[in-house]
Image (cartoon, helix red, strand yellow):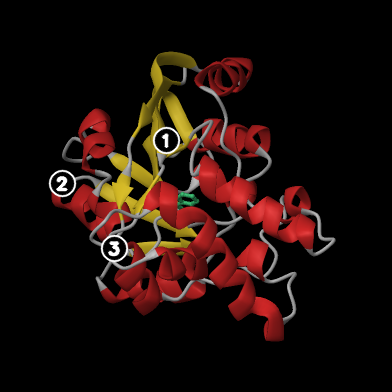
Amino acid sequence: MTDDSGGNAAGQRWEAAGYRHHAGFVPELGMPVLELLAPKPGERILDLGCGDGTLTERLAASGAAVTGADSSPDLLAAARARGLDVRLMDGHALSFDAEFDAVFSNAALHWMKDPDTVIAGVARALKPGGRFVGEFGGAGNVGRIVAALKDALARRGLDGAAANPWYFPTAEEYRGRLEAAGFTVATIHLIPRPTPLPTDMAGWLGTFAQSFLNPVREAERAALLAELLDRLAPELRDAGGRWTDDYVRLRFAAVKPY
Ligand code: BEZ
């Protein structure tokens, strides 16, 4: 969950117990990208945006020597409690130099609003021939939710675009950025993945969309939330009351040349 000091996730706070409750599915759905990475015993791997370490632990189980990096102290404490080697670090300021065989990232790069700085840091962190393999939100991700949030803020005279903490590129755009940094792209594509929520939309918004909610005065937030749920229910809630987010993922694998 490394966030975006280079961007504007104003006031976004991660808290491990709440994250597990409302968003435990995020690392669970990261297995395909872990398989794309195909970690090998003895490799040194950086998990960029490791969060509470759920996937970092699975990477380590492959026999690789894994280091996690994240900017949330609370999530890192949960990762450390698993016995993992983790560092408090912003994804825009990676301090590694040609030390890793691979950099892995799941559901974190969309929080980093200056992608070229992040990609340059990843390139620096990798050994020649090292792999950069990841998945994050791609173009159109949670499109209905973003539209509802922007409209709700606009009705209050607030700028939803300025409050948006996320970077959701097309495959073409991100390929271009990787190639400009010297990577060879092996695969990159968007994957529409409607995602049932374990709790509900109020829990999801409170966990992920704090940057949109924070500009509204606290006394008005309950009304804002009610308005958002009314708007989104016809599109994202089924007859049984179950919410499904309109996720679109961007999955890629790239190699730093020798
Ligand atoms: C995530 O961090 O998993 C996420 C953030 C924003 C929209 C969708 C997913």
User: What's the amino acid at mark 2?
Assistant: Gly
Query: Does 202 sit above or below residue 30?
Result: below
Q: Distance between the Cα atoms at labels 2 and 1?
A: 31 Å
Locate the C terminus by quadrant. top left
Query: Does 76 sit above or below residue 150?
Result: below
The local crowd at label 2, few if under 14, some if 14 to 19, many if 20 or more residues have their Cα within 10 Å, is: some
Label 1 residue near ligand 1, CB within 8 Å: no
The local crowd at label 3, few if under 14, some if 14 to 19, many if 20 or more residues have their Cα within 10 Å, is: few
Helix, strand or loop status at disc 3? loop
The mark that comes first in sequence, 1 or 3, is 3
Residue 151 lies, in percent from the top left, at 70, 52
The mark that comes first in sequence, 2 or 1, is 2
Relative placement, left or right, of 137 versus 199 is: right
Q: Answer whether residue 14 is visible to the viewer in this image.
A: yes
Residue 182 lies, in percent from the top left, at 57, 16
How many numbered callouts? 3
Instruction: Please say if the residues under marks 2 and 1 sit with CB atoms less than 8 Å apart.
Output: no
Which residue is depicted at the point 79% across and 64% down? 156
Query: Does 224 sit above or below residue 59?
Result: below
User: What's the amino acid at mark 3?
Assistant: Gly
Residue 8 lies, in percent from the top left, at 72, 56
Helix, strand or loop status at disc 1? strand
The local crowd at label 1, few if under 14, some if 14 to 19, many if 20 or more residues have their Cα within 10 Å, is: many
The residue where tag 2 is placed is 63
The residue where tag 3 is placed is 241
The residue where tag 1 is placed is 248
Q: Answer whether residue 111 is visible to the viewer in this image.
A: no
Query: Does 170 sit above or below residue 150?
Result: above
Q: Distance between the Cα atoms at labels 3 and 2?
A: 42 Å
Residue nearest the viewer, comparing 46 with 210: 210
